[in-house]
Image (cartoon, rainbow, N blue to C red):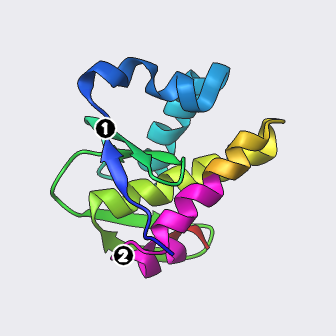
Amino acid sequence: MDSITRKLVTEEQRLNFLPNFIGRHFLQYETAIYNQMSQSNSEYNGGYWDYYTLSNGGFYMALSQTEPLKMECVGNYFEDEMSADAGSIGVNLFVLNAFAWQVDENKFSTAFHQLRDYALDHPEANKILGFID
């Protein structure tokens, strides 16, 4: 099986990125991402987020920074340092899971599984999975 690849969304594509993937819930999704990052990283106070599409049809938002993040999930006692990309994937998985349960649209469950499949091949897969477990 081919590995799943990501592609950075261009500046011209950014405006329609979330509406295309999320639909009418795109503002709630974006806000939920920022809120989840704030809950998971006490040092987070905003920043620029890159958007990525995945070759399997998935997507995610990633905090654009080179410094690692101190991520924690109080619900499962996870606490570890992760790259901004890995931490962002974890945050997106949390939010996609919540939307899959709260919004009656199958696309959120599908998007969760597409991103999780990508995360399984990520260099920090064990940390991502520990964070969302």
Mark 1 belongs to which amino acid?
Trp
Query: Which residue is drawn at the image coordinates 62% and 68% (left, top)?
Result: 75
Q: Nearer the viewer, residue 57 or 37?
A: 57
Query: Which residue is drawn at the image coordinates 43% and 76% (left, top)?
Result: 125
Mark 2 belongs to which amino acid?
Glu
x then y, percent, for residue 47: 26, 36
49 in the magenta segment:
no
119 in the magenta segment:
yes
- Residue underneath mark 1: 49
Q: Is residue 76 left or right of residue 89?
A: right
x then y, percent, for residue 20: 55, 25
Question: For residue 102, which numbered disc appears in the image?
Answer: none
Q: Is residue 58 left or right of residue 8?
A: right
Query: Which residue is drawn at the image coordinates 74% and 46% (left, top)?
Result: 100
Task: Tell me the element at label 2.
Answer: loop
x then y, percent, for residue 116: 56, 64
Task: Tell me the element at label 1.
Answer: strand
Discs 1, 2 touching: Cβ within 8 Å: no
* Label 1 vs 2, first from the N-terminus: 1
Q: Is residue 101 left or right of residue 107?
A: right
- Residue underneath mark 2: 124
Up-down relation of residue 62 to residue 5 (above or below): above
Q: Which residues are magenta?
A: 112-130
From the image, give the main secondary structure of the stretch colored magenta.
Answer: helix
Q: Residue furthest right?
A: 104
Rendered image quadrant of residue 107: top right
